[in-house]
Amino acid sequence: MNTNARVGTFVIGALVLLGLAVYYVGNEQWGRHTTPYKTYLKYAGGIGPGADVLFGGINVGRVNAVRAWDHDPTYIEILLDVKGGTPVNQKSVAKLGSVSLMSNPAVSITTGSHDAPLLKAGEAIPSEETVSLDDMARKLSGIADNADELITQVQGDLKQISARASVLLSNLNDVTGSANRQQLAGILSQANELLAAQSPRIDRITAQIESLTHDADDVVKKAGPLIDHADGAIVNVSSMVDQVRDPVKEDLVALKSTMDQAKNLITGLQVLVRSNDDNIHDALENIRIATENLDQLTDDTKQRPWSLIRIRQPPDRQVPK
Protein backbone atom coordinates (compact mmCIF):
# COMPACT_ATOMS: atom_id res chain seq x y z
CA MET A 1 0.00 0.00 0.00
CA ASN A 2 1.46 3.37 -1.00
CA THR A 3 1.61 6.51 1.10
CA ASN A 4 -1.49 8.20 -0.40
CA ALA A 5 -3.65 5.19 0.38
CA ARG A 6 -2.43 5.12 3.95
CA VAL A 7 -3.15 8.82 4.41
CA GLY A 8 -6.63 8.43 2.95
CA THR A 9 -7.39 5.48 5.23
CA PHE A 10 -6.19 7.49 8.26
CA VAL A 11 -8.34 10.50 7.37
CA ILE A 12 -11.43 8.37 6.86
CA GLY A 13 -10.87 6.59 10.16
CA ALA A 14 -10.40 9.90 11.97
CA LEU A 15 -13.62 11.28 10.52
CA VAL A 16 -15.50 8.13 11.59
CA LEU A 17 -14.13 8.40 15.12
CA LEU A 18 -14.99 12.13 15.24
CA GLY A 19 -18.55 11.43 14.13
CA LEU A 20 -18.92 8.69 16.73
CA ALA A 21 -17.59 11.02 19.42
CA VAL A 22 -19.96 13.82 18.43
CA TYR A 23 -22.88 11.41 18.34
CA TYR A 24 -21.96 9.97 21.71
CA VAL A 25 -21.50 13.36 23.36
CA GLY A 26 -24.74 14.73 21.89
CA ASN A 27 -26.59 11.61 22.89
CA GLU A 28 -25.20 11.83 26.42
CA GLN A 29 -25.99 15.55 26.74
CA TRP A 30 -29.35 15.85 24.99
CA GLY A 31 -30.58 12.32 24.60
CA ARG A 32 -30.81 10.13 27.63
CA HIS A 33 -30.57 12.96 30.21
CA THR A 34 -33.19 15.41 28.87
CA THR A 35 -36.68 16.24 30.14
CA PRO A 36 -39.47 16.99 27.66
CA TYR A 37 -41.61 20.10 28.12
CA LYS A 38 -43.97 22.06 25.93
CA THR A 39 -45.22 25.60 25.67
CA TYR A 40 -47.73 27.54 23.57
CA LEU A 41 -47.29 30.87 21.81
CA LYS A 42 -49.38 32.87 19.37
CA TYR A 43 -46.26 34.02 17.55
CA ALA A 44 -43.18 31.84 17.09
CA GLY A 45 -41.26 33.81 14.50
CA GLY A 46 -37.98 32.15 13.51
CA ILE A 47 -38.30 29.21 15.94
CA GLY A 48 -37.79 25.77 14.41
CA PRO A 49 -36.53 22.31 15.36
CA GLY A 50 -33.02 22.53 16.72
CA ALA A 51 -33.40 26.09 18.07
CA ASP A 52 -31.73 26.73 21.40
CA VAL A 53 -33.61 26.67 24.70
CA LEU A 54 -32.26 29.15 27.23
CA PHE A 55 -32.88 28.99 30.99
CA GLY A 56 -31.92 32.30 32.57
CA GLY A 57 -29.72 32.96 29.52
CA ILE A 58 -27.95 29.58 29.75
CA ASN A 59 -28.27 27.04 26.91
CA VAL A 60 -30.01 24.00 28.43
CA GLY A 61 -31.69 22.26 25.49
CA ARG A 62 -33.11 22.20 22.01
CA VAL A 63 -36.49 22.68 20.35
CA ASN A 64 -37.80 19.29 19.25
CA ALA A 65 -40.84 20.30 17.18
CA VAL A 66 -42.88 23.36 16.22
CA ARG A 67 -46.44 22.86 15.01
CA ALA A 68 -49.96 24.25 15.14
CA TRP A 69 -51.83 23.12 18.24
CA ASP A 70 -54.64 20.68 17.57
CA HIS A 71 -56.92 22.00 20.34
CA ASP A 72 -56.55 25.69 19.42
CA PRO A 73 -55.15 26.51 15.95
CA THR A 74 -54.49 30.11 17.04
CA TYR A 75 -51.60 28.84 19.21
CA ILE A 76 -48.30 27.28 18.16
CA GLU A 77 -47.22 24.24 20.15
CA ILE A 78 -43.48 24.08 20.80
CA LEU A 79 -41.97 20.82 22.11
CA LEU A 80 -38.76 21.24 24.11
CA ASP A 81 -36.03 18.91 25.33
CA VAL A 82 -34.36 20.42 28.39
CA LYS A 83 -31.26 19.12 30.13
CA GLY A 84 -32.09 16.98 33.15
CA GLY A 85 -31.84 18.74 36.49
CA THR A 86 -32.83 22.15 35.09
CA PRO A 87 -35.11 23.69 37.79
CA VAL A 88 -38.03 24.65 35.56
CA ASN A 89 -40.87 25.52 37.99
CA GLN A 90 -44.45 26.65 37.80
CA LYS A 91 -43.41 30.32 38.01
CA SER A 92 -41.07 30.01 35.01
CA VAL A 93 -42.24 31.76 31.85
CA ALA A 94 -41.34 30.79 28.26
CA LYS A 95 -41.06 33.46 25.57
CA LEU A 96 -39.15 34.27 22.43
CA GLY A 97 -35.63 35.52 23.00
CA SER A 98 -32.05 35.50 21.83
CA VAL A 99 -28.56 35.83 23.26
CA SER A 100 -27.70 38.84 21.05
CA LEU A 101 -29.18 40.85 18.20
CA MET A 102 -27.24 38.86 15.59
CA SER A 103 -27.96 35.39 17.03
CA ASN A 104 -30.77 33.08 15.97
CA PRO A 105 -34.13 33.17 17.77
CA ALA A 106 -34.42 30.93 20.81
CA VAL A 107 -36.94 29.95 23.45
CA SER A 108 -36.06 31.77 26.66
CA ILE A 109 -37.30 30.41 29.99
CA THR A 110 -37.15 32.57 33.14
CA THR A 111 -35.85 31.13 36.41
CA GLY A 112 -39.21 31.59 38.12
CA SER A 113 -39.41 31.46 41.90
CA HIS A 114 -37.38 29.60 44.50
CA ASP A 115 -40.50 28.50 46.40
CA ALA A 116 -42.50 27.37 43.35
CA PRO A 117 -42.78 23.58 42.77
CA LEU A 118 -40.90 22.08 39.82
CA LEU A 119 -42.73 21.11 36.63
CA LYS A 120 -42.97 17.45 35.79
CA ALA A 121 -41.84 15.97 32.49
CA GLY A 122 -44.30 16.69 29.67
CA GLU A 123 -46.04 19.58 31.45
CA ALA A 124 -46.63 22.92 29.76
CA ILE A 125 -44.48 25.89 30.69
CA PRO A 126 -46.48 29.13 31.11
CA SER A 127 -45.80 31.44 28.19
CA GLU A 128 -45.65 35.18 27.58
CA GLU A 129 -46.07 36.81 24.20
CA THR A 130 -43.40 39.19 22.93
CA VAL A 131 -43.85 42.13 20.62
CA SER A 132 -43.16 41.09 17.05
CA LEU A 133 -41.38 43.18 14.46
CA ASP A 134 -44.64 43.62 12.56
CA ASP A 135 -46.36 45.02 15.66
CA MET A 136 -43.46 47.36 16.26
CA ALA A 137 -43.59 48.52 12.63
CA ARG A 138 -47.33 49.21 12.88
CA LYS A 139 -46.87 51.21 16.08
CA LEU A 140 -44.02 53.21 14.57
CA SER A 141 -46.13 53.89 11.50
CA GLY A 142 -48.98 55.17 13.67
CA ILE A 143 -46.59 57.40 15.58
CA ALA A 144 -45.18 58.77 12.32
CA ASP A 145 -48.70 59.50 11.02
CA ASN A 146 -49.57 61.47 14.15
CA ALA A 147 -46.20 63.23 14.36
CA ASP A 148 -47.09 66.05 11.92
CA GLU A 149 -50.32 66.87 13.73
CA LEU A 150 -48.58 66.75 17.09
CA ILE A 151 -45.77 69.02 15.89
CA THR A 152 -48.30 71.54 14.51
CA GLN A 153 -50.21 71.55 17.79
CA VAL A 154 -47.02 71.95 19.80
CA GLN A 155 -45.91 74.86 17.62
CA GLY A 156 -49.25 76.62 18.18
CA ASP A 157 -49.01 76.07 21.93
CA LEU A 158 -45.45 77.36 21.95
CA LYS A 159 -46.51 80.53 20.14
CA GLN A 160 -49.28 81.17 22.68
CA ILE A 161 -46.91 80.51 25.57
CA SER A 162 -44.31 82.83 24.05
CA ALA A 163 -46.88 85.61 23.61
CA ARG A 164 -48.09 85.25 27.20
CA ALA A 165 -44.52 85.21 28.47
CA SER A 166 -43.81 88.44 26.58
CA VAL A 167 -46.88 90.10 28.14
CA LEU A 168 -45.84 88.87 31.59
CA LEU A 169 -42.30 90.21 31.18
CA SER A 170 -43.67 93.55 30.00
CA ASN A 171 -45.95 93.78 33.05
CA LEU A 172 -43.07 92.90 35.35
CA ASN A 173 -40.91 95.60 33.79
CA ASP A 174 -43.70 98.15 34.34
CA VAL A 175 -44.22 97.12 37.96
CA THR A 176 -40.52 97.12 38.78
CA GLY A 177 -39.79 100.34 36.94
CA SER A 178 -37.64 103.08 38.40
CA ALA A 179 -40.63 105.34 39.21
CA ASN A 180 -42.40 102.63 41.24
CA ARG A 181 -39.18 101.70 43.00
CA GLN A 182 -38.54 105.33 43.98
CA GLN A 183 -42.12 105.75 45.21
CA LEU A 184 -41.94 102.57 47.27
CA ALA A 185 -38.58 103.62 48.73
CA GLY A 186 -40.03 107.03 49.66
CA ILE A 187 -43.02 105.46 51.40
CA LEU A 188 -40.78 103.14 53.39
CA SER A 189 -38.46 106.00 54.31
CA GLN A 190 -41.39 108.12 55.53
CA ALA A 191 -42.74 105.22 57.54
CA ASN A 192 -39.37 104.68 59.19
CA GLU A 193 -39.06 108.37 60.01
CA LEU A 194 -42.57 108.45 61.44
CA LEU A 195 -41.91 105.45 63.65
CA ALA A 196 -38.57 106.87 64.78
CA ALA A 197 -40.20 110.22 65.65
CA GLN A 198 -43.11 108.70 67.58
CA SER A 199 -41.17 106.00 69.42
CA PRO A 200 -40.01 108.29 72.32
CA ARG A 201 -43.53 109.60 72.85
CA ILE A 202 -44.98 106.12 72.81
CA ASP A 203 -42.34 104.95 75.26
CA ARG A 204 -43.18 107.88 77.53
CA ILE A 205 -46.89 107.04 77.38
CA THR A 206 -46.16 103.42 78.25
CA ALA A 207 -43.95 104.46 81.18
CA GLN A 208 -46.62 106.80 82.53
CA ILE A 209 -49.26 104.09 82.29
CA GLU A 210 -47.01 101.68 84.15
CA SER A 211 -46.42 104.30 86.84
CA LEU A 212 -50.15 104.87 87.25
CA THR A 213 -50.76 101.13 87.49
CA HIS A 214 -48.04 100.83 90.13
CA ASP A 215 -49.58 103.70 92.15
CA ALA A 216 -52.98 102.02 91.97
CA ASP A 217 -51.46 98.77 93.22
CA ASP A 218 -49.84 100.65 96.10
CA VAL A 219 -53.18 102.16 97.04
CA VAL A 220 -54.82 98.75 97.11
CA LYS A 221 -51.97 97.29 99.17
CA LYS A 222 -52.16 100.14 101.69
CA ALA A 223 -55.91 99.69 102.07
CA GLY A 224 -55.52 95.97 102.72
CA PRO A 225 -54.00 96.07 106.27
CA LEU A 226 -56.81 98.36 107.48
CA ILE A 227 -59.28 95.54 106.97
CA ASP A 228 -57.56 93.34 109.58
CA HIS A 229 -57.80 95.79 112.56
CA ALA A 230 -61.42 95.67 113.66
CA ASP A 231 -64.93 94.79 112.59
CA GLY A 232 -65.92 98.42 112.47
CA ALA A 233 -62.91 99.30 110.42
CA ILE A 234 -63.80 96.48 108.04
CA VAL A 235 -67.16 98.05 107.29
CA ASN A 236 -65.62 101.49 106.83
CA VAL A 237 -62.79 100.23 104.68
CA SER A 238 -65.18 98.12 102.62
CA SER A 239 -67.29 101.17 102.01
CA MET A 240 -64.22 103.20 101.11
CA VAL A 241 -62.93 100.46 98.82
CA ASP A 242 -66.33 100.31 97.14
CA GLN A 243 -66.20 104.04 96.62
CA VAL A 244 -62.66 103.96 95.32
CA ARG A 245 -63.01 100.82 93.22
CA ASP A 246 -65.33 102.20 90.60
CA PRO A 247 -63.23 105.29 89.82
CA VAL A 248 -60.07 103.19 89.82
CA LYS A 249 -61.70 100.68 87.50
CA GLU A 250 -62.88 103.45 85.24
CA ASP A 251 -59.41 104.97 85.21
CA LEU A 252 -57.84 101.58 84.52
CA VAL A 253 -60.37 100.88 81.77
CA ALA A 254 -59.62 104.28 80.29
CA LEU A 255 -55.89 103.61 80.56
CA LYS A 256 -56.30 100.19 78.98
CA SER A 257 -58.38 101.69 76.21
CA THR A 258 -55.69 104.30 75.65
CA MET A 259 -53.02 101.57 75.57
CA ASP A 260 -55.06 99.57 73.08
CA GLN A 261 -55.54 102.64 70.94
CA ALA A 262 -51.82 103.34 71.08
CA LYS A 263 -51.02 99.76 70.07
CA ASN A 264 -53.58 99.86 67.27
CA LEU A 265 -52.16 103.15 66.08
CA ILE A 266 -48.65 101.71 66.07
CA THR A 267 -49.81 98.64 64.16
CA GLY A 268 -51.81 100.67 61.67
CA LEU A 269 -49.07 103.20 60.96
CA GLN A 270 -47.35 101.01 58.40
CA VAL A 271 -50.62 100.13 56.66
CA LEU A 272 -51.71 103.75 56.64
CA VAL A 273 -48.37 104.86 55.21
CA ARG A 274 -48.54 102.35 52.37
CA SER A 275 -52.23 102.79 51.57
CA ASN A 276 -52.98 106.46 52.11
CA ASP A 277 -50.44 109.21 52.66
CA ASP A 278 -53.15 111.81 53.31
CA ASN A 279 -54.33 110.08 56.49
CA ILE A 280 -50.88 110.18 58.11
CA HIS A 281 -51.41 113.74 59.43
CA ASP A 282 -54.80 112.76 60.89
CA ALA A 283 -53.24 109.76 62.64
CA LEU A 284 -50.44 111.96 64.06
CA GLU A 285 -53.04 114.46 65.26
CA ASN A 286 -54.96 111.67 67.03
CA ILE A 287 -51.75 110.47 68.67
CA ARG A 288 -50.98 114.06 69.76
CA ILE A 289 -54.46 114.48 71.27
CA ALA A 290 -54.18 111.14 73.07
CA THR A 291 -50.76 112.17 74.37
CA GLU A 292 -52.09 115.51 75.62
CA ASN A 293 -54.96 113.71 77.33
CA LEU A 294 -52.54 111.37 79.05
CA ASP A 295 -50.30 114.30 80.03
CA GLN A 296 -53.31 116.14 81.43
CA LEU A 297 -54.40 113.02 83.31
CA THR A 298 -50.88 112.66 84.71
CA ASP A 299 -50.77 116.34 85.74
CA ASP A 300 -54.20 116.07 87.33
CA THR A 301 -53.12 112.98 89.23
CA LYS A 302 -49.96 114.71 90.47
CA GLN A 303 -51.78 117.88 91.48
CA ARG A 304 -54.85 116.17 92.89
CA PRO A 305 -53.84 112.66 94.01
CA TRP A 306 -56.91 112.59 96.28
CA SER A 307 -59.04 112.24 93.13
CA LEU A 308 -58.08 108.56 92.96
CA ILE A 309 -59.84 108.00 96.32
CA ARG A 310 -62.45 110.78 96.63
CA ILE A 311 -64.81 112.06 94.04
CA ARG A 312 -65.11 115.61 95.39
CA GLN A 313 -62.46 117.87 96.79
CA PRO A 314 -62.71 118.17 100.59
CA PRO A 315 -63.70 121.59 101.87
CA ASP A 316 -60.98 123.91 102.99
CA ARG A 317 -60.36 123.98 106.68
CA GLN A 318 -61.59 127.13 108.46
CA VAL A 319 -59.09 129.24 110.24
CA PRO A 320 -59.90 129.06 113.96
CA LYS A 321 -61.16 132.27 115.42
Image: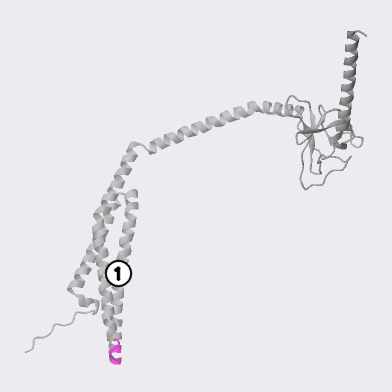
Question: In the picture shown, does residue 321 fall above or below 251?
Answer: below
Question: In the picture shown, does residue 224 fall above or below 184?
Answer: below
Q: Residue at x 48, y 34 (%)?
A: 165
Q: Residue at x 24, y 59 (%)?
A: 201
- The residue where tag 1 is placed is 254
Residue 76 visible in image: no
Report the span colored magenta. Answer: 227-235
Asked whether 236 or 51 is in front, the reply is: 51
Position of residue 194 measured from the top left corner of the image (x, y, whole percent): 26, 52
Quadrant for residue 76, please give it.
Answer: top right
Tell me the amino acid under the disc marked 1: Ala
Position of residue 181 measured from the top left corner of the image (x, y, whole percent): 33, 40
Q: Residue at x 32, y 71 (%)?
A: 253
Mark 1 is surrounded, within 10 Å at the Cα level, by few (under 14), some (14 to 19) or many (20 or more) other residues, namely few
Q: Residue at x 27, y 68 (%)?
A: 210
In the picture as drawn, the residue positioned furthest to the right comes out as 1
Position of residue 245 measured from the top left corner of the image (x, y, whole percent): 30, 78
- The image shows a total of numbered marks equal to 1
Q: Left or right: where does residue 307 sit relative to residue 18?
A: left
Residue 161 visible in image: yes
Q: Left or right: where does residue 269 sit relative to residue 4?
A: left
Element at badge 1?
Answer: helix
In the picture as drawn, the residue positioned furthest to the left comes out as 321
The C terminus lies in which quarter of the figure? bottom left
Asked whether 292 or 214 is in front, the reply is: 214
Give yes or no for residue 46 being in the magenta stretch. Answer: no
Quadrant for residue 11, please give it.
Answer: top right
The N terminus lies in which quarter of the figure? top right
Quadrant for residue 309, please give it.
Answer: bottom left
Question: In the picture shown, does residue 227 fall above or below 194?
Answer: below
